[in-house]
Amino acid sequence: MTSQIKSPPLKNCPKTVIDRAGLDCLFDSLRVRGFTVVGPTVRDGAIIYDNLGSTNDLPMGWTDEQEAGSYRLKKRSDKALFGYTVGPHSWKKYLFPPRQRLWMAKRQGRSFSIENNDPPENSKFAFIGVRSCELHAIGIQDRVFIGDKFIDPVYKSRREQAFIVAVNCGQAGGACFCASMNTGPKAESGFDLALTEILNRKSPYFVVEVGSAAGAEVMGDIPQRQLAEKDEQAAEAVVAGATSQMGRAMEVEGIRELLPDNPDHPRWEEVAKRCLSCANCTMACPTCFCSTVEDTTDLTGDHAERWKRWDSCFTMDFSYIHGGFVRQETKSRYRHWITHKLSTWHNQFGSSGCVGCGRCITWCPVGIDITEEVGAIRASLS
Amino acid sequence: MVQPRKPKLAVWKFASCDGCQLSLLDCEDELLAVAGAVDIANFPEASRAVAKGPYDLSLVEGSITTPHDAERIHKIRRNSKYLITIGACATAGGIQALRNFQDVREFISIVYAHPEYIESLKKSTPIAEHVFVDFELRGCPINKMQLVEVISAFLNGRNPNTPRHSVCMECKMRGAVCVMTARGIPCLGPVTQAGCGALCPAYNRGCYGCFGPMETPNTPSLSKWWKKLGANDPDLVRAFRGFNAYAEEFRRESEAHEVR
């Protein structure tokens, strides 16, 4: 699914082993190559994605507990660096920034000139700790933004420069359902390097899988040792552990017909009673890609700008056309979102729009659960 | 070449704390540009000079609480080409609309030595209940950047960008962590209109609803969740009876939780 816009994936991914010092080296090596290193860190009661100064900024010894409408940061009993699932942020904030100025214009006498485009800012990111579901989400946004006739230049530039260090999940959260969406928990492709964190008594170490020529080149700088059979077995056990812990499951059989075939199901009214139409699900979703543009002028009218910003199908303005709003009721907005995500996305882009990360479940302020809503409609028909 | 006449701007005060018109003075960097783009014809907070109407743009702060003010707003409307109300008082009745839930005569009898001198209406009401309003700018206080945006839009004959969606979208766009989900702090963000830039949640506090109800507020669902987080009916009454207590959806929700 992930488009191969970078160096092609390696045929038989070579594997090797690094320790914490090796991870420090990896950070340094990426920085020397001009990457802004971004990844998980603890802030404001959650594990978010932000700039990382060193491996000390990683959420060592922290994990999260997630349920519908609830996220809690918890201490672990070990020193795992990647012992959590996914938090409120996703990588889309780097590849598809929440606000971008598209261009500006200046009045010149009776005419005007388009200024811009802004010189590309420092947007060469190395992502640390990308989960399998997130790799799939990036693949889905690749399809949307750069996989067809019309290319988003900002996304393209950021995506092409990005270096991806994936991490295989060692545990699944209460809202996770990647196993049933076939998007995890093991990172299969779309990365430059993939780490599996092995927790032993002394200090965690990492099995590294090299996924691209760029990844191989970076690994050339890193002290490492050969992979032993016991390392490989330990890595397999880590991923198997996550698979067995999935907090939720989505039954995908026949889902492409299930939702569009039931536009008048009473469940839509029921969910609309709970849904706040606040748009949190779409903001947190790593594949939701909608945006709007805002035109603005300064007081003199001599300077105008066009900005692009995240939008959501849960707002009224989203469905405004001349004369009114198409989706006035929350019912029709929720139905539209979930039907697009799970069904019509296939028609449009050739895959599901859901990767089973569970963010829309955890970060819904009133705990609406996408798997439960599908389950309710399915159950009522059987 | 003859310079086109600059539009005349007037600022009017009704029952309010002055905070919203101070936002205009607070614009600092933009203030000179504002003064360059318009003739400030009446703005008591900034200058005693008053130019006669009619005015191209009137910014009205405050709610209607006295019979005198109920008259005065009509005169202002007659003298204004465009009338824009600014702030929670002018758009929803303000914090002083808490009187609307009680008997104001009882307050007057307790507070004043000579209640007979006090002429006060039973209710504090938004400007739009009295005259036609061209645009309402929400907030307690208003966001100064939104004010500049609205004035710019007026001067350039375009629609202002003041979205009516929830505060949550601003929270997520600035990368703030949801205080309700991650900390269990009750927050009005999901039912409140954006505009503040998600100020409180970004500092780990729940939203107070300063910008009033968002476009489609589902207050009963949010209240239910607040109760799960430990809030009780009096908590909910207090939460919805803030600066926008008399805004329709917030008023109905607070009344639904009143213990009689």
Image (cartoon, grey):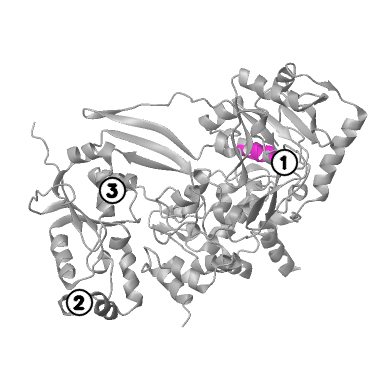
**B169 lies above or below B93:** above
Q: Chain of mark 1?
A: A
Q: Chain of mark 3?
A: B
- In front of the other: A376 or B227: B227
- In front of the other: A225 or A163: A225
Q: Amino acid at mark 3?
A: Ser
The answer to which image quadrant residue A198 occupies is: top right
The lab-note entry on whether marks 3 and 1 share a chain reads no
Q: What residue is drawn where x is 34% and y is 56%?
A: B138
Of the residues tagged 3 and 1, which is closer to the observer?
A: 1
The residue identified by callout 1 is A61
Of the residues tagged 2 and 3, which is closer to the observer?
A: 2
Q: What residue is drawn where x is 29% and y is 33%?
A: A303
- Please report whichever mark, 2 or 3, sits nearer to the chain's N-terminal start: 3
Q: Label 3 neighbourhood size at 10 Å, few (<14), some (14-19), many (20+)?
A: some
- Which quadrant is home to the N terminus of chain A? top right
Q: Amino acid at mark 2?
A: Ala
The lab-note entry on whether marks 2 and 3 share a chain reads yes
The answer to whether any part of residue A128 appears in the image is yes
| Residue B24 drawn at (x, y percent) | 25, 47
Q: Is residue A136 magenta?
A: yes
The residue identified by callout 3 is B23
- Element carrying mark 2: loop
Write the start and end of the magenta stretch as one range: A135-141
Considering every residue shown, the one lying at the far right of the view is A229
| Residue B154 drawn at (x, y percent) | 25, 47
- In front of the other: A82 or A242: A82
